[in-house]
Image (tube, helix red, strand yellow):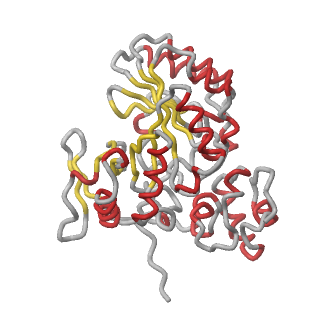
């Protein structure tokens, strides 16, 4: 198979790389008009174009299924805007904030819960004025102990930019933890340079990296080397994974991923139930299926390799650990209690099964 050497950002690129059929051009162009597309060469070369069910392709190659919106899906499925006091800040929990510093990613996941908010049409990073306002907000709120840098993918920024942001946050005394959420070590590992690592470490604060990965195949070759460089530099890593139908919704796949992460010295942190982002119903499992997978995983691996299975409640009510709640009631609807004691009914919102 010919290696792909350039980034794929259009339907024509995907057709030329033989990752989609020319017969699907019109439908996929409609998808591309709604949602950003990008595959790095690293990711494109992981895909087996002859496997219709390839788990890497399913995550990154657009599908006409994205044109179908479930009635319960929303542009802002977890309520970021409801908890955004100034641009770039999401303040959902008292002691921590999200700082959405970047609006672009090296790749665009087809299940992304911020797919309506990210992409090249949104600019690369927060404007200078908005960043200043966000930093002022953090400085003015002494309860903020942790800043989670996200986007988009903040590692898309240059080491110089990352060093500047690190320095600005380091000057805020009550901020103690900087956590960077990224897919870069997996999808664009060459970006994990000595300069990037130095920029991340240019602080007296404690720095964590939240690595987003969904399948053990993503952790092959250059990705594993990038992760090792970060860990060897003294930067602790935790992982975040989304439970995705057709990607990792079987216990063998989840086990392989979690074991490989621990072998690379990455602590499995969260397994997210799929959010209600537009055009993503074909990725979501039921809550019951997720519970069963976690129960099976618990029988196979030690606690070191177990993530917490969570649901981000719609409406900005925060994450709830699914396994701590009882199963669905007689009506088939799950009820979850948020951190403030409020109860929320949650119905599964999956794609209808194919009818033979």
Locate the N terminus by quadrant: bottom right
Residue 326 in the image: above or below residue 86: below
Residue depicted at x 39% and y 64%: 251
Residue 50 in the image: above or below residue 66: below
Residue depicted at x 64% and y 31%: 125
Q: Left or right: where does residue 241 sit relative to residue 191?
A: left
**Residue 60 point in image, percent of width and height:** 62, 58
Residue 262 in the image: above or below residue 85: below
Residue 263 versus residue 70: which sits nearer the camera? Answer: 263
**Residue 76 point in image, percent of width and height:** 47, 48
Residue found farthest to the bottom: 356
**Residue 12 point in image, percent of width and height:** 80, 62
Residue 282 versus residue 43: which sits nearer the camera? Answer: 43
Residue 293 versus residue 16: which sits nearer the camera? Answer: 293
Residue depicted at x 41% and y 38%: 82
Q: Left or right: where does residue 2 sit relative to residue 150?
A: right
Residue 356 in the image: above or below residue 254: below
Residue depicted at x 17% and y 71%: 330
Q: Left or right: where does residue 263 sit relative to residue 54?
A: left
Q: Left or right: where does residue 156 sit relative to residue 348?
A: right
**Residue 121 point in image, percent of width and height:** 69, 43
The image shows a total of numbered marks equal to: 0
């Amino acid at each position: 198979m010919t290696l792909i050497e350039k980034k794929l950002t259009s339907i024509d690129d995907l057709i030329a790389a033989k990752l989609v059929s020319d017969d699907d051009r019109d439908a996929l162009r409609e998808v591309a008009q709604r949602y950003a597309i990008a595959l790095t060469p690293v990711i494109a070369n992981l895909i087996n174009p002859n496997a219709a069910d390839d788990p890497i392709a399913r995550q990154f190659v657009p599908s006409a299924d994205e044109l179908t919106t479930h009635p319960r899906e929303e542009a802002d499925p977890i309520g970021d805007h409801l908890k955004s006091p100034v641009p770039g800040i999401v303040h959902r929990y008292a002691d921590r904030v999200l700082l959405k510093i970047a609006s672009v990613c090296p790749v665009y996941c087809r299940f992304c819960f911020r797919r309506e908010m990210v992409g090249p049409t949104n600019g690369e990073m927060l404007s200078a004025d908005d960043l200043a306002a966000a930093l002022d907000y953090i400085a003015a709120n002494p309860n903020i102990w942790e800043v989670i840098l996200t986007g988009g993918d903040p590692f898309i920024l240059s080491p110089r930019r990352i060093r500047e942001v690190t320095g600005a946050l380091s000057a805020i005394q009550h901020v103690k933890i900087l956590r960077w959420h990224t897919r870069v070590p997996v999808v664009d590992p060459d970006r994990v340079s000595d300069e990037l690592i130095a920029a991340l470490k240019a602080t007296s604060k404690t720095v964590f990296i939240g690595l987003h990965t969904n399948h053990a195949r993503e952790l092959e070759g250059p990705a594993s080397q990038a992760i090792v460089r970060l860990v060897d530099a003294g930067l602790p890593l935790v992982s975040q994974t989304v439970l995705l139908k057709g990607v990792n919704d079987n216990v063998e796949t989840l086990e392989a991923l979690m074991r490989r992460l621990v072998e690379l010295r990455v602590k499995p942190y969260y397994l997210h139930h799929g959010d209600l982002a537009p055009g993503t119903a074909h990725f979501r499992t039921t809550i019951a299926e997720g519970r069963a997978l976690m129960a099976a995983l618990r029988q196979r691996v030690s606690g070191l390799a177990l993530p917490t299975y969570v649901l981000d409640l719609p409406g900005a009510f925060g994450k709830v650990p699914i396994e701590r709640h009882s199963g669905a009631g007689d009506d088939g609807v799950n009820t979850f209690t948020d951190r403030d004691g409020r109860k929320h009914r949650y119905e599964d919102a999956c794609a209808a099964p194919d009818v033979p």
